[in-house]
Image (spheres, helix red, strand yellow):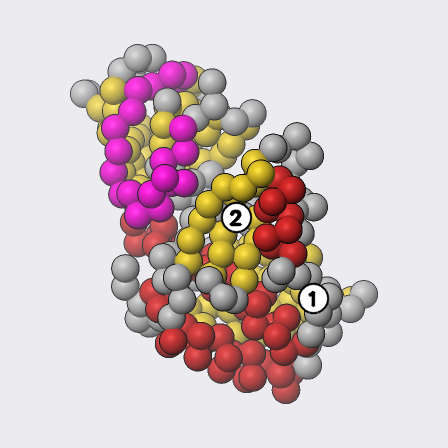
Amino acid sequence: MPTRKLYWEDAYLKEFSSKVVSVSKGDRLSLILESTAFYPESGGQACDKGIIKGEGFYASVEYVREEGGEIIHEATKWEGSVEVGSVVKGMIDWDRRYRLMKMHTAAHLLSAIIRKVKGGGVKVVSAHKDYDTSRIDFNVKIAKEELPIIEEEANKAISKGAEVKAFFLKRDEAAKYVARYGEDVGLVPPEAEEVRVVEIVGLHAVACGGTHVRDLREIGGIRILKRQSKGKGITRLIYTLTEGGRP
């Protein structure tokens, strides 16, 4: 059975209880739960870390991945034992998660701003959102002189604020919805009948399964650290967050 994704229901959920549905041990412990708030590494967003514990059991979750709809929590350090059917409590590393949420929303905002600065046809080729720094590769040449403009426009949008919301639409409806912002659903698996859309109201909307803040103001600020040419007209921007921003 697919794992219930509590992080889609409430990205601000820090603790939860759930039943264990699978346990495997080797050089590491792997747990599958009925439901989880732990976000698995996917969509370019780093996974959550944290703790899962129960009666006489404690595990430090260091890596989380999704396989066939099931979310697998992996630990190399644990104490005691846990059985299938046991109820455990999960606690995510909230400081890490919240910063990753801000990083991911910042990536969407930068996509919108660069499209505004460079014009239509701008696409994200790849991206990785991590705790300290994140990167986005765009299919367009971005001059060094344009970086201060992009950064300023992004931070103006953050200061002004905008609601960020996530919702599901039928595939054809989602395609039309994100097309208004120059995006498409091409990377969504073809068998998916519904698509999760994340929208920065009035600025951007794209198919996305990641965790995000509720308002741009929570990001605090963006600083572009480096620009790299990756060849074939692709530009990589490496960015980080500045202090500030609270839920």
The answer to which image quadrant residue 34 occupies is top left
Residue 225 appears at what percent x and percent y?
53, 74
Q: Nearer the viewer, residue 107 or 77?
A: 107
Left or right of residue 197, residue 5 in this image? left
Residue position marked by numbered label 1 in the rendering: 122
Q: Out of 234 and 59, give the one closest to the viewer.
A: 234
In the image, farthest residue toward the left:
55
Residue 74 higher or lower than 174, as above or below:
above
Q: Is residue 64 magenta?
A: no
Q: With respect to residue 237, does 99 lie above or below? A: above
Residue at 55% over, 84% down:
148
Q: Residue at x 43, y 26 (%)?
A: 3
Which residue carries the number 2 mark? Answer: 197
- Name the residue rendered at 25%, 24% in the picture: 88
Mark 1 lies on a secondary structure that is loop
Which percent across, then down, holds residue 41? 50, 42
Specify the amino acid type for callout 1.
Answer: Val
Residue 143, placed above or below residue 164: below
**Residue 168, visible in the rendered structure:** yes
Residue 102 as seen in the image, left or right of residue 80: right
Marks counted in the figure total 2
Left-right relation of 66 to 30: right
Secondary structure of the residue carrying tag 2 is strand
- The residues colored magenta run 4-23
Q: Earlier in the sequence, mark 2 or mark 1?
A: 1
Front residue of this view, candidates 111 and 75: 111
